[in-house]
Image (cartoon, rainbow, N blue to C red):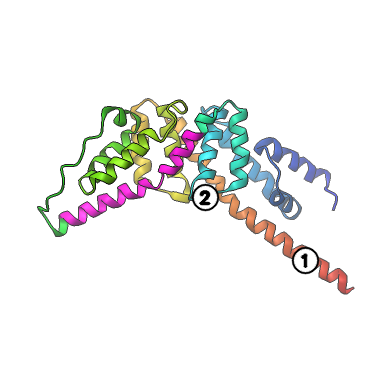
Amino acid sequence: MAQSVEQERIKQKFIAARGYWRPWTDAILKLHPDFLERYADYAGQPARKGPLSPRMVELVYVALDASSAHMYGPGLSTHLKGALNTGATPSDVLDVLHLVAMQGLEAVFASTAILGQELDSQLPGERRSAGIPAGEAFKAAYPVAASSIEYLAQFDAEYAQVVTDFMQFGGTGKGLSANERLLVQIALNACFTAFNPEAVRLHIRAALNTGISASEILQVIQLGAHLSVHGTALGAVSLNEIIESVEEKSHESQ
């Protein structure tokens, strides 16, 4: 079916705002073009309006699409290209992927804290190991994790050490700055796919303490919201396939 002038206008607006065109956008353009136009405005606004550079915006999108809580391949490919085209280096991307790999530790830290609270409640006075202190270099690079690592070491010093080594030496050392790492970690923990309020709070506190502005923090928080459209995309493509199948059967019976 040929597109109307209005549909073509919306398509070009969407491509300009989001940088891609896919089967799901084609399906929605045909079935509900008003949605697609409003979505282009909604999804594009946080990327355009804010203090972060296009490079940093794309790196945040890489983190969110690569995250094990989302793993959206088409978006990841789009934003990897976007990141490299806006000046990101392979080391930047690998540092982002390192932070993605670390994301599961947030749950370990939170759950270990709960374990400690319950032990203190049920077995008051129970002795634990003195743990291991986090080094100054580690504290500077990962200010939020440092205290959690030290607490974790009271229960399992060996595990705490391998976690420390992975966090400290798993990155490239020549990609993201410390502040950029904090922003990516805020984005990962603030996204609805793996929302972790306590981790968000701690990373925001650390970010503000290092001079990151509230507007930068707000922008990385906003960037994650519209990833929920990937569910819409799945539904739209399926709906369009069903409609086309019904129409085809109807034509065959005539």
Q: In the rendered image of this protein, does residue 158 appear above or below residue 143?
A: below
Residue placed under numbered mark 2 in the picture: 70
Kindly identify the amino acid type of the residue bearing the numbered disc 1.
Ser
Quarter that holds the C terminus: bottom right
Residue drawn at x 50%, y 40% is: 63
Q: Viewed as shown, does residue 62 lie left or right of 121?
A: right
Q: Position of residue 108 (x, y in %)?
A: 33, 49
Kindly identify the amino acid type of the residue bearing the numbered disc 2.
His
Tell me where the magenta segment starts and ends, as one range.
94-120
Q: Main secondary structure of the magenta part?
A: helix
Judge whether residue 109 is colored magenta: yes
Say which of 15 and 7 sits in front.
15
Q: Viewed as shown, does residue 230 lie left or right of 209?
A: right
Residue drawn at x 73%, y 65% is: 242
Q: Position of residue 232 (x, y in %)?
A: 62, 54
State the image quarter where residue 140 is shown. Answer: top left
Residue drawn at x 44%, y 30% is: 172
Q: Position of residue 202 (x, y in %)?
A: 33, 39
State the image quarter where residue 37 is shown. Answer: top right
Residue drawn at x 15%, y 60% is: 122
Instruction: Looking at this view, name the residue that lies furthest to the bottom.
Output: 253
SS for dot 2? loop
- Number of other residues with Cα within 10 Å of mark 1, as a class: few under 14, some 14 to 19, many 20 or more: few
Res 204 label? none
Residue placed under numbered mark 1 in the picture: 245
Judge whether residue 126 is colored magenta: no
